[in-house]
Amino acid sequence: MTTTPSGTALQRGIGAARRFNSGPHRAALVVSLLVSLFAALFVTSYSLAMGNPQPHDIPIGVVSESVSPEQLESSLQSATDTSFLVSSYPSADAAKAALEQQQIYAALVTESGSASDLYISSASGASIAHVISAEATQVGSSLGVQLTVTDLDPLRPNDPSGLVLFYLALASTIIGFVGAIQTRVNASGMTIAGELAWDAGRAVLVGLVISLTTGPVFGFETFPFLPVWGVLAMTVFIAGAVYNFFRVIVGGKWALMPTWIIFILISNPSSGGAVAPELLPPFYEFMGRWMPTGATVRALRDLAYFPEALHPEPYVVLGAWLVAATAAFVIARRIRYGFGRVERTPA
């Protein structure tokens, strides 16, 4: 039987396709496509969250007999093209207390004629404080008062943009799951007790090193060392536990993908660390409140700038993630492999 050139070419093509499908190139193609997709998702997520911050519903306080909340709201909106929620307070002390509790971002106090004070809190949200203070002169003119801007909670000199706390949370989450990946790859064959012990030890060590580097060593931030160390260690452990769960469920080859989605695509950009929550789109503003990175940022901000007004919510969120992620990993590990040694987790 004579084979035509076209038939030979077709056979070669079929053979090449079979070799491609059964060899390593197919997996390489799948990984390349997935990585490209995740690169696009990364850019999209961060651009949507932080590319064009739009302030909305910013809570503000006012203490005045001559300026009503409605007048201040109208003046601020005209000057900044931003929506505000203005509340009246009975005294300057009450308004300052609300600032310390991070219930409001600024307070206008007009208790002495035309001389008035505009109190802001850069530590609560540097971007919002900048928006308000930048238009203080115009706002004062529209209200017929002369405003003196005072920052009650200024940022540290080494962190004028207020980003160091965000970087702490970012490093803790990324190193958390990267450390878990490297431990499972390079130290296989442990029992579940050994895995959890090393996860905890690694989290404590990473939290210690990050806290030392940021605080005592380089002085990027000033904070109570032990509580910050504890928060960062908890964050590192949570990220590792989430990865460990997915490694058991979907295998080591693909466990990074869902972990990346949770922490890099959702948790980090929605944290409110780089941009205040009121500047984020509604989805990110909502998610940031319940995700580990957002809880870490809020806990660190309280400890660094508002130690007398700590909020329980971020610790509740972190505690819930810690318990849920650890329990999910332990249960999945028990069902699939038992509590004994696993020499090599199947992909």
Image (tube, grey):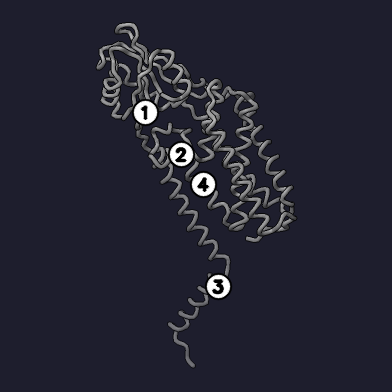
Of discs 3 and 1, which sits in the foreground?
A: 1
Of discs 1 and 2, which sits in the foreground?
A: 1
Of discs 4 and 3, which sits in the foreground?
A: 4
Q: Which residue position holds label 2?
A: 270
- Distance between the Cα atoms at labels 3 and 1? 60 Å
Q: Which residue position holds label 3?
A: 19
Of discs 4 and 1, which sits in the foreground?
A: 1
Residue 265 image point, x, y percent:
48, 45
14 in relation to 314, above or below: below
Task: Sort mark 1 into few (<14), some (14-19) or many (20+) by Cα contacts within 10 Å.
Answer: some
Q: In the rendered structure, which amino acid carries the disc numbered 4? A: Ile
Q: Residue furthest top?
A: 112
Q: Residue furthest bottom?
A: 1
Judge from the rendering whether residue 199 lies leftward or rightward of residue 136; answer left or right: right
Disc 4 or 3, which lies upstream in sequence?
Answer: 3
Q: Which residue position holds label 4?
A: 262
Q: In the rendered structure, which amino acid carries the disc numbered 1? A: Ile
The residue shown at (31%, 29%) is 82
202 in relation to 91, above or below: below
Q: In the rendered structure, which amino acid carries the disc numbered 3? A: Arg
Look at the numbered disc 1 and give the secondary structure of its residue.
strand
- Distance between the Cα atoms at labels 1 and 2? 17 Å
The residue shown at (47%, 19%) is 153
Q: Which residue position holds label 1?
A: 58
Disc 2 or 4, which lies upstream in sequence?
Answer: 4
Disc 3 or 1, which lies upstream in sequence?
Answer: 3
Callout 1–callout 2 Cβ contact below 8 Å: no
Look at the numbered disc 2 and give the secondary structure of its residue.
loop
The residue shown at (41%, 37%) is 50
